């Protein structure tokens, strides 16, 4: 009977303890986050990523449709991690009322990302993303492959591409898996 209780406690420990992927604070560095805008395809959008004075990361810029442009993104490679059968990606952030995408790669060299689109509210909020709802996408097209299974993660990214010219600002506090 003790073995059963110990197994149950171990399961509860792993199921209830989140895996923190990113937790920004005033001492955080952002040099290993990379901007990838539509300029890679001739577009004219621009963005920046850095630390805000309050200790959160700040992704800001202007999306331009000029020259067939239309997106700004920032990505971050992490050491490969198993998500240990977790079900939810949780992001504490504050947006500007616009739609964004959160993207992950199970292998940073994959040509496609797993994508989840979310709407921001202009308030600090926690966006909860069911891992199983993240679909594979390449250059804005949904691919005919299975949704993300969460076995492994190697890259995180945020992207804005709302098919219009606009300025944007997204503050990011914490990304974890539950």
Image (tube, rainbow, N blue to C red):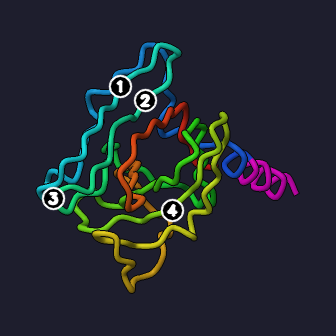
Residue 2 magenta: yes
Q: Main secondary structure of the magenta part?
A: helix
> Is the residue 113 above or below the residue 100 in the image?
below
Mark sitting earlier along the chain (3/2):
2
Q: Which residues are magenta?
A: 1-12
The local crowd at label 4, few if under 14, some if 14 to 19, many if 20 or more residues have their Cα within 10 Å, is some
Task: Find residue 144 and report its horizontal and vertical position in percent.
Answer: 39, 86
Q: Which mark is residue 67?
A: 3
Was residue 90 drawn as part of the magenta stretch in this picture? Answer: no
Q: Residue at left 35%, top 25%?
A: 50
Mark 2 vs mark 4, CA separation in Å: 20 Å
Task: State the mark number for residue 50.
Answer: 1
Of residues 86 and 169, which is closer to you in this image?
169
N-terminal-most mark, 1 or 4: 1
Q: CA distance from mark 1 to mark 3?
A: 27 Å
| Residue 94 in the image: above or below residue 75 | above
Task: Say which of marks 3 and 2 sits in front.
Answer: 3
Residue 42 quadrant = bottom left
In which quadrant of the rendered view does residue 20 lie?
Answer: top right
Where in the figure is residue 164, as x and y percent of width and height?
38, 57
Dot 1 falls on a residue whose secondary structure is strand
Q: What number is the disc on residue 58?
A: 2
State the residue at coordinates (58%, 35%): 94
Secondary structure under the numbered disc 4 in the rendered image: strand
């Amino acid at each position: 009977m003790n073995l059963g209780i110990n197994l149950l406690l171990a399961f509860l420990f792993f199921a209830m303890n989140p895996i923190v992927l990113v937790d920004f604070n005033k001492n955080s560095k952002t040099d290993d986050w990379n901007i990838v805008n539509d300029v890679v395809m001739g577009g004219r959008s621009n963005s920046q990523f850095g630390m805000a004075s309050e200790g959160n990361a700040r992704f800001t810029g202007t999306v331009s449709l000029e020259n067939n442009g239309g997106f700004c993104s920032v990505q971050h490679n992490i050491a490969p991690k198993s998500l240990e059968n977790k079900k939810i990606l949780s992001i504490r952030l504050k947006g500007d009322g616009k739609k964004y995408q959160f993207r992950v790669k199970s292998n940073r060299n994959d040509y496609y990302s797993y994508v989840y689109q979310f709407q921001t509210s202009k308030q600090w909020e926690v966006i909860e993303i069911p891992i199983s709802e993240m679909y594979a996408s390449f250059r804005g097209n949904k691919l005919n492959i299975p949704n993300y299974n969460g076995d492994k993660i190697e890259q995180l990214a945020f992207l804005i591409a709302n098919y219009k010219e606009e300025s944007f600002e997204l503050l990011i506090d914490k990304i974890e898996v539950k």
